[in-house]
Image: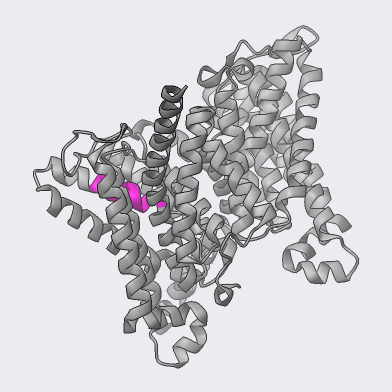
Amino acid sequence: MKRIAVLVAVLGAVYFSGNGYLMNLCVVTALFTLPALGLSLLMGYTGQISLGHAAFVGLGAYGSAILCKSLGLNPWLAIPLATATATLAAWAIGWLVFRLRGHHLAMATLAFGIIIHVATVELKGLTGGQDGLSGIPALSFFGYAMNSDAAIFPFAWLVCILGIVLAGNLVHSPAGYAMRAVAESEAVAASIGIAPDRLKRRIMALSGLYAGLGGALYAHYLGYISPGPFDVGFSVRLLLMVALGGFAGIWSVLFGVLFVVMTSELLKPFGNYDVVLYGVLLVVVMVWCPRGLLDGLAMLWRGGMRMWRGAQAAR
Amino acid sequence: MTVELTAELTALAQYVASGLVVGSIYGLIGVGFTTVYNVTGIVNFSQGDFASLGALGAIGLIAAGVPLPVALAIAVLCVGLLGVLIERVAIRPVGNDVLRGIIITIGVGVALQGIAVLVWGTDAQPLRAFSGEKPVNMGGVTVPPQAFWVVGTAAVLMMLLWLFFTRTYVGKAFRACAVNAYAAGLMGIPTRAMRSFSFFVAGLTGAIAGVIVAPIALMQYDSGIFLGIKGFVACIIGGFGNPVGAALGGLLLGLLEALSSGYLSSGYKNAIAFVVLLAFLFVRPSGLLGELEAVKR
């Protein structure tokens, strides 16, 4: 609760500072946090890898955009429908992929991600192919169109904080302990009355819900979508966000997202260095700080302090 | 009627020819996966990037004025050494942890692609064909001369690897590590050196696959992703950990892709490979020839 108050205070300060650049970064962070939270629930807490999470974000984004543009639905109706589609898709994919584990699971989810990406490129009649879809109507609230950073900022963060609170409640509920039990050992989990496959499918569906909702909001926020942002690279970036936060940890996911959004902004003027940094960071975090970048830095700091004190004592 | 039939047959033969060429590449990359997996238990998701790096390296060296054969040799050897370096720095510290191994090799792949962008840019780069561009006509089927280089090199390399693994002392030690690394260590086989060596071989085969296919398919920084995934699909079709299966799976996948893009639609070519992958994973996850019993973990 205290953390949420701090977060709201910081966000309020950003909002009332009126700094458009900061506000843009914050909106992007909120929209990326939703899919990253979903991935953290699946990977960090339930121990199941997914390399195709961008597909669910894409399903949400394209679903909502197509419902609005072809059927003329109101965005307020299209977003829940598209989110439900992504959720259902995730649940259905769960039936298939959770027969596999380890490398095979990783490749199957990667393949699923690529199939959806190829479909968004090739189904030109529906998705506009590489050109994408433009003119997606913005969300409007009693005639107040949320089509700028400042306008969507409160709503995006409201949804994001709601997502954080719900995910936090879930991982501290009995279901959350069941998830961790499945991550540790499926055989043990099954022996104490948890059905691992059913639980994994449900978490996959929930994960798809988070990703789809993030994607749908993204589509209505930008007003334009193309297949590019929903490729394998985005799945890997989501993976990096979750890895930087140490996989399991609702609040550390927020840190991971913020870190990736900030570094990609800071490195933008220098060209393509961000990709190299992402790759190296992913390796460094996995090798030296499997519990997240913050934890690794804290350990480095404590180790450094100990050495320094040792040197003082020796003198 | 007969004219039409002949035309149909020629078209079919053309698809088969191009499928076999691409398939040899997938097979070579698949063999690279197998070599690393058998010794370390890790699927190296950056295997495809070895291919694109090898090709781009050779292209860069040729642009710098190095003669073609020397450039190819240097590029291939450097990628092999890079494989050793990657194993030492990134893979060895995590041991046999599957999840961390997957994420680390993905990170390595992303870093390699990023470096390739910085050095060579995002444009696709051409490599000069080894022996001219004049297509060879064989009874109506035209193939570029490079196709012979691809199939020939792949066949010779696979043969050499097979001889190495089955007929030499080091190859035997290598297989011992694949069967049971702990017991192999007890018998005095330097398992760590074998791990490094497996990455060296994987780097070499990957880079060779890259340089021989580069004159046919343009190479760019991210070509490795698809090559790598297709190589993995080849492994799944043939049975993971089985080198013969990987080669066979590569050829099958190449044929399937060529035929489907010929008769269905070329846009969906990539998706079709993954549909095949999913189908194999669900119906027969051990592949056509079955996984090597000894390396099941």
Quadrant in which residue B15 is drawn: top left
Quadrant assignment, res B96: bottom right
Main structural element of the magenta stretch: helix, strand or loop? helix
The answer to whether A300 appears left or right of B297 in the picture is left
Identify which residue is drawn at 83% across, 49% down: A169
Q: Residue B252 appears at what percent x and percent y?
A: 49, 49
Q: Position of residue B231 (x, y in %)?
A: 46, 52
Left or right for B1, reference A64 = left
Residue A310: give x, y in percent of width and height: 45, 79
Q: Give the percent coordinates (x, y) of residue B75.
A: 22, 54
Residue depicted at x 77% and y 37%? A87
Residue at 28% across, 42% down: B214
In this picture the colour scheme is one colour
Q: Which residues are magenta?
A: B48-57
* The stretch drawn in magenta includes residue B31: no
> Which residue sits furthest top?
A143
Q: Quadrant where the C terminus of chain B lies?
A: bottom right
Answer with left or right where residue A149 lies relative to residue A143: left
Relative to A256, residue A121 above or below: above
Q: Give the residue furthest to the bottom.
A: B187
Depicted A28 relative to depicted B286: above or below = above
Q: Nearer the viewer, residue B192 or A178?
A: B192
Residue B229 in sight from this viewpoint: no
Q: Residue furthest front?
A: B2
**Residue A92 in sight in this render:** yes
Along the line of sight, which residue is nearer the eye, A55 or A236? A55
Q: Residue at x 33, y 73 (%)?
A: B163
B36 is higher (above) or lower (below) than B206 = below
